[in-house]
Amino acid sequence: MDHLLIRKFRHRLLAWLHRSRSGRVFFVRRIPYKDVKRATDGFQRVIYSNSEVTAYAARFGEGGGGVFLVKEVKDFGQQNDVFCRQIQFLGRLHHRHLLSLKGFSVGKDKRLLIFDNIENGSLKEHLNDPLKTPLNWRTRLQIANEVVAALEYLFLFSDPPAYHVSISSSNIMLDENFAAKLSDFGLLTPNANSVMMPNSGDSMKQKSCKIIFQLGVLILELVTGQSSEMEGSDLIPWIQQSRFYNSIDKMIDPDLGNNYDCTELKNLLAVAKLCIKSRDKATFTISQLFRYLQRKIDISHDKVR
């Protein structure tokens, strides 16, 4: 019943958005290729890379304006029409926890997208780099909620509804206030790690398995400070144990010390366990998950950071 109400609400809201946007032109600035190459130190400042994109840190001008994210899109090749559709799609997305598209650039063999400020780098850096200031418990809770809020927006309010999204500590960026920003999303691509976001009924549950699983892994990284990409990582086997609560003290990030709420920790791990179980069959939607987090974990902005 819940998903039927969501579908009805989504269609009405999208219809209103179309009416309110009539005649609007989405302008995205084209940035000279030489400027992007210079800003990324010749494409040497790699933040993350996968089979679809390579993301670089970029600083334009004389050090002013902050650090931006530049994505080289690999799988579009010379298909300019596909690249243009990607630009149009990304230009229409507006959410406080999605990186905003600021421009694009085209080189001889590169298709580049320029996104918003990423002053504090990636979440992975703050969890794994000993030189970075550790994230406190409230900030980690806030990041979990912000990621789910962004996913809810992509599930319900994206139009057209076909796109991919991937979440990991590597591709979640943090702005100057340590707010989370998803960076790896766009039109549907053929890579298996990308997830087509569902837009109707049963497919909303069935096709969301991978993204919910990725969310579970992310929550485990937030709690433990460990990277799921590290060789020998035992995060997933640990949360799948029936008595994993007995070993929480051994797994929680030492950087947190005793500065966390035990009830909130257990609630967050309960969400992670449900997400990991959804690898093969999702039993709930992102919207249901978001509501659960709101009920179970009291996030108020005056308590964060």
Image: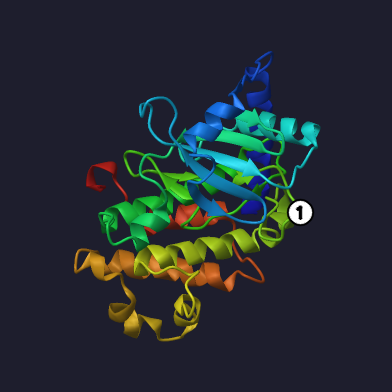
Task: Residue type at mark 1: give it.
Answer: Pro
Q: Is any atom of residue 101 visible in this view?
A: no
Position in image of residue 126 (x %, y %): 34, 56
Kind of element beneath mark 1: loop
Q: Specify whether 48 is left or right of 91.
A: left
Q: Specify whether 242 is left or right of 134.
A: right
Which residue is nearer to you in this view: 284 or 33? Answer: 33
Which residue is nearer to you in this view: 48 or 212? Answer: 48
Position in image of residue 214 (x %, y %): 55, 62
Q: Is any atom of residue 127 visible in this view?
A: yes
Which residue is nearer to you in this view: 3 or 263? Answer: 263
| Image quadrant containing the N terminus | bottom right
Which residue is depicted at the point 23% across and 42% down? 302
Position in image of residue 155 (x %, y %): 62, 46
Q: Specify whether 269 is left or right of 255.
A: right
Which residue is nearer to you in this view: 214 or 171? Answer: 171
Position in image of residue 69 (x %, y %): 50, 39
- Please state the total of marks drawn on the protein image: 1
Which residue is depicted at the point 33% across and 60% down? 129
**Furthest-top residue in view?**
23
Which picture quadrant has residue 176? Answer: top left
For disc 1, the marked residue is 190
Q: Give the vertical position of 23 relative to 260 (above or below).
A: above
Q: Crowding near pointer 1: few (<14 within 10 Å), some, many (20+)?
A: few
